[in-house]
Amino acid sequence: MMVAMMMPVVMVMPVVMVMVMIVMMVMVMIVMVPMVMMMVMMVSMVMMVMVMTGFNLTFWNRASFCHCT
């Protein structure tokens, strides 16, 4: 009796697992896409700020050195 009851569950389990995996993947994609976009935007902003500050620092250092000498 138990074996007969277990057989359909064993047959259904892989399908349920696959469906759960697909749903998890879709949810992860939906959640991750905005997060990735935010991360890319933040990284690009930080890179731009770093480049600007780097240019400014080098410019001011050169200007100060020239002024001192």
Image (tube, helix red, strand yellow):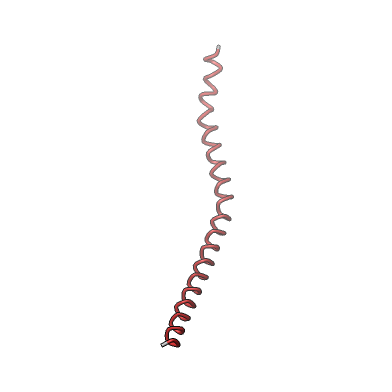
Asked if residue 58 lies left or right of residue 13, the reply is left
> Given the current orientation, which residue lies at the most extreme top position?
1
Coordinates of residue 21 in the picture (x, y in percent) = 53, 38
Q: Position of residue 59 (x, y in %)?
A: 46, 81
Q: Quadrant of the N terminus?
A: top right
Left or right side of 63 for 42: right
Instruction: Find residue 20 and report its image quarter.
Output: top right
Residue 57 sits above or below residue 41 on the image: below
- Depicted 20 relative to depicted 35: above or below: above
Residue at the spot 45% in from the left edge and 88% down from the top edge: 67
Q: Residue at x 51, y 36 (%)?
A: 18
What residue is rendered at 50% in x and 74% in y? 52
Nearer to us in this view, 53 or 37: 53
Q: Position of residue 65 (x, y in %)?
A: 43, 83
| Image coords of residue 40 (percent x, y) | 52, 61
What quarter of the picture does the C terminus occupy? bottom left
Examine the rendered structure and indicate whether residue 63 appears above or below residue 3.
below
In the picture shown, does residue 68 fall above or below 50? below
